[in-house]
Image: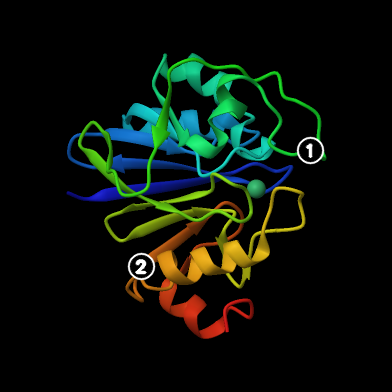
Amino acid sequence: MTIRVEVTADRRFGTNSYVVEDDQTHDAVIIDSNLEPELAVDASRRSGAKVRAILLTHTDLDHIAGLHDLREAFGDVPIAVHAGERNVIEKGEPLRREFGPLATQLENVVDLVEGEPFRAGSLEFEVLHTPGHSPGGVTLKIDGFLFTGDALFAGSVGRSDFANSDGTTLIEGIKSRLMTQPDDMIVYSGHGPATTIGREKKTNPFLT
Ligand SMILES: [Zn+2]
């Protein structure tokens, strides 16, 4: 199996949405849904990707803003999210006390559970719970790739100054779930460029 990853970033928040595709079967998922969903839709159409699910690393607005558009483009595919943030998607509950509620209320929401593989067509993801930026933050692992959302960035880690954030939990999760991965694992973050576990082990000032 060869996994192909296409990165798209919106211009407002620089939030990354990823198209992850099995090059043989063309089964694919979208990871996170930024403010310019048409970029991921176009990328999928160009490669002939058959999008089977939308996976969310967490539910801050800039990672879910394009969900309705993605559903319009790809049909009623499941939206997978950790139980800790499921109500944000299903019921429109606010993730952050600091911001207002969202209008988002979507059906066909399924759980991402740590330790249970998440399958979408021929793709199979491992789910690692990496909370702290938000309660239901997850990292999705497939092949040599880790999609870390806003837990781990190249040279940085996610914000933990929200009421439902926790800086200690964030660093603990990164150290136990991510820094224990092989050095050559490629890290695709919620914002900014890709990096590797080995590079972050050596140079990330928040993890030394
Ligand atoms: Zn973000």
Give neighbour class at mark 1: few <14, some 14-19, many 20+ (Cα, 10 Å): few
Query: Residue at the location (76% across, 51% down)?
Result: 162
Residue at label 1?
Answer: 97
Q: Number of labelled discs?
A: 2
Q: Is residue 16 left or right of residue 161?
A: left
Query: Residue at the location (76% across, 25% down)?
Result: 101
Q: Is 206 or 16 nearer to us in this picture?
A: 206
Label 1 CB less than 8 angstroms from ligand 1:
no
Label of residue 185 in the image: 2
Q: Earlier in the sequence, mark 1 or mark 2?
A: 1
Locate residue 112, reporting x and y percent.
40, 38
On screen, residue 54 above or below 144: above
Between disc 1 and disc 2, the foreground one is 1
Measured in 3D between alpha carbons, the distance from the residue under mark 1 to the one under mark 2, in whole angstroms, is 35 Å
Label of residue 28 in the image: none
Coloration mode: rainbow
**Of the residues shown, which amino acid type is indicated by label 1?**
Arg
Find numbered disc 2 in the image and state the secondary structure of the residue it sits on: loop
Query: Residue at the location (82% across, 40% down)?
Result: 98
**Of the residues shown, which amino acid type is indicated by label 2?**
Met
